[in-house]
Amino acid sequence: MLDASILEKLTLVLADETPIETLDQHERYIYSVMNHIERILNTRRGSVKYIPDYGLPDLSVIYRHLPGSLLVLQHHISFTLLKYEPRLVAVQVKMIEAQSTDFMIAYELLCQLKGIGSVRFTTTFDGHEMVRVWRE
């Protein structure tokens, strides 16, 4: 069944305040997964006490050890998303070159979603440790 998360059903909005009734069931499902991916990637490992490995490691460590840490971050993204987003069947994480002049790390996520198939997202990590995810 393609559906939004329980929180989205209760609040009737997605994380970006988009009302869920403005999207069809297919789009709602994709955006729900995308919002959860963004939430996971913006959470620092260890900050959720009852799930200590939820989220990514401290990004300041990743930035300090660039460029060698880019593959480490890529691995953490893949492992964490597959573990904590149950609607993902598979994910391929590929580093892409950021188009802006600001210092930014960017990855393409090619996700296989249950009941949907392939969906491509782009994610950027800016210098302020904020992660954005959007659909291509």
Image (spheres, rainbow, N blue to C red):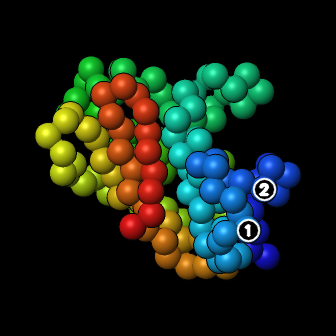
Query: Taking the image as drawn, is residue 36 in sight?
Result: no
Q: Which residue is mark 2?
A: 12
Helix or strand or loop: what does disc 2 sit on? loop
Q: Residue 83, image x and y in percent? A: 63, 49
As drawn, the residue found furthest toward the right would be 10
Query: Taking the image as drawn, is residue 84 in sight?
Result: yes
**Residue drawn at x 30%, y 47% as measured from the top left:** 106
Horizontal side, residue 78 vs residue 28: left or right? left
Q: How many marks?
A: 2
The foreground one among 13 and 68 is 13
Marks 2 and 1: in contact by CB < 8 Å?
A: yes
Q: Earlier in the sequence, mark 1 or mark 2?
A: 2
**Residue drawn at x 14%, y 40% as measured from the top left:** 101
Q: Which mark is residue 3?
A: none
Q: Name the amino acid type tagged 1.
A: Glu
Q: Which mark is residue 21?
A: 1
The foreground one among 44 and 122 is 122
Q: Name the amino acid type tagged 2.
A: Leu
Label 1 crowd (10 A; few <14 / some 14-19 / many >=20): few
Horizontal side, residue 133 vs residue 101: left or right? right
Q: Residue 98, image x and y in percent? A: 21, 48
Q: Residue 3, image x and y in percent? A: 76, 68
Horizontal side, residue 118 vs residue 71: left or right? right
